[in-house]
Image (cartoon, helix red, strand yellow):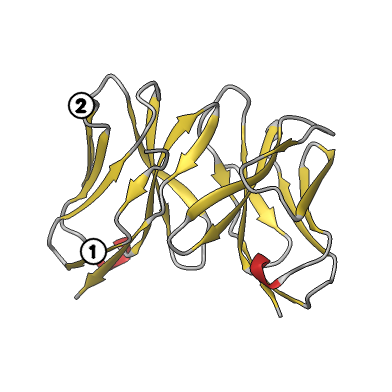
């Protein structure tokens, strides 16, 4: 399809792992991105992965990339209430950032 | 740190009014963008600018125009606001040749 797809909502309990999934469209994207939007704020770059990598780990964050299926995921270990936010995946297409719909992560104590 | 500021966090306007949303950045970035964010639709690109006095239409430019008279400032103009332009508006900037975009805090516009 034409769109970058994400599920809209995810709810987890504090301390559990969260996995946010994304399907992108452009196999020629050099980088793929995860942005985080906290309530009432703009977007901040959370992490990114170079397209020739399968996995990238950064403290509690793990990004997995399956190029064959054009599938990107973000795993947050030991999820905290402060991780509650909207998470956007994004690809570069035609020189522009194309965002998914955003996944709203809700962390329950 | 890159700082991107937007003139208002919340704005309420009436149908038919002319609305100006301002974005200012302090890092000398060439590229600036205006998006609108709606639930379930993610971010959609309205207009962008590669340099002073240059502008390009994004995916949903209808009903909007932009102005870039100075490098640090990118204005989004709603010539005649309509209720379907009620949304969160996000400004972003980036360096030419880089991919990472830096976002402002957003302006939540309500058109009544």
Q: Is residue B107 above or below residue A3?
A: below
Disc 2 crowd rating (10 Å Cα; few below 14, some 14-19, many 20+) is few
Mark 2 falls within which chain?
Answer: A
Instruction: Judge by depth and name the residue closer to the eye, A27 or A86.
Output: A27
Image coords of residue B102 (percent x, y) = 56, 43
Q: Secondary structure at mark 2?
A: loop
Instruction: Judge by depth and name the residue closer to the eye, A27 or B9.
Output: A27
The image quadrant that residue B72 belongs to is top right
Residue wearing tag 2: A54
Residue A25 badge = none
Residue A80 badge = 1
User: Where the C terminus of chain B falls, by quadrant?
Assistant: bottom right
Image coords of residue B107 (percent x, y) = 64, 64
Instruction: Judge by depth and name the residue closer to the eye, B82 or B56.
Output: B82
User: Where the N terminus of chain B falls, by quadrant?
Assistant: top right
Q: Is residue B84 above or below residue A79?
A: below
């Amino acid at each position: 399809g034409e769109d970058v797809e994400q599920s809209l909502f995810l709810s987890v309990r504090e301390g559990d792992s969260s996995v946010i999934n994304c399907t992108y469209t452009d196999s020629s994207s050099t980088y793929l991105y995860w942005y985080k939007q906290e309530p009432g704020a703009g977007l901040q770059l959370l992490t990114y992965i170079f397209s020739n990598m399968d996995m990238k780990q950064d403290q509690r964050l793990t990004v997995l990339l399956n190029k064959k299926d054009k599938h990107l995921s973000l795993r947050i270990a030991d999820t905290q209430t402060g991780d509650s936010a909207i998470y956007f995946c994004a690809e570069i297409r035609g020189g522009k950032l194309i965002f998914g719909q955003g996944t709203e992560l809700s962390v329950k104590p | 740190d890159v700082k991107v500021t937007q003139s208002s966090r919340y704005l309420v306007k009436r149908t038919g009014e002319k609305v100006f949303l301002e974005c200012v950045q302090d890092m000398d970035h060439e590229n600036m963008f205006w998006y609108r964010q709606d639930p379930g639709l993610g971010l959609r690109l309205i207009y962008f600018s590669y340099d002073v006095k240059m502008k390009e239409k994004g995916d949903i430019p209808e009903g909007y125009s932009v102005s870039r008279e100075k490098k640090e400032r990118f204005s989004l103009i709603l010539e005649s606001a309509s209720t379907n332009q009620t949304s969160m508006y996000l400004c972003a900037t980036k360096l030419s040749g880089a991919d990472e975009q830096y976002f402002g805090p957003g302006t939540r516009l309500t058109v009544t």
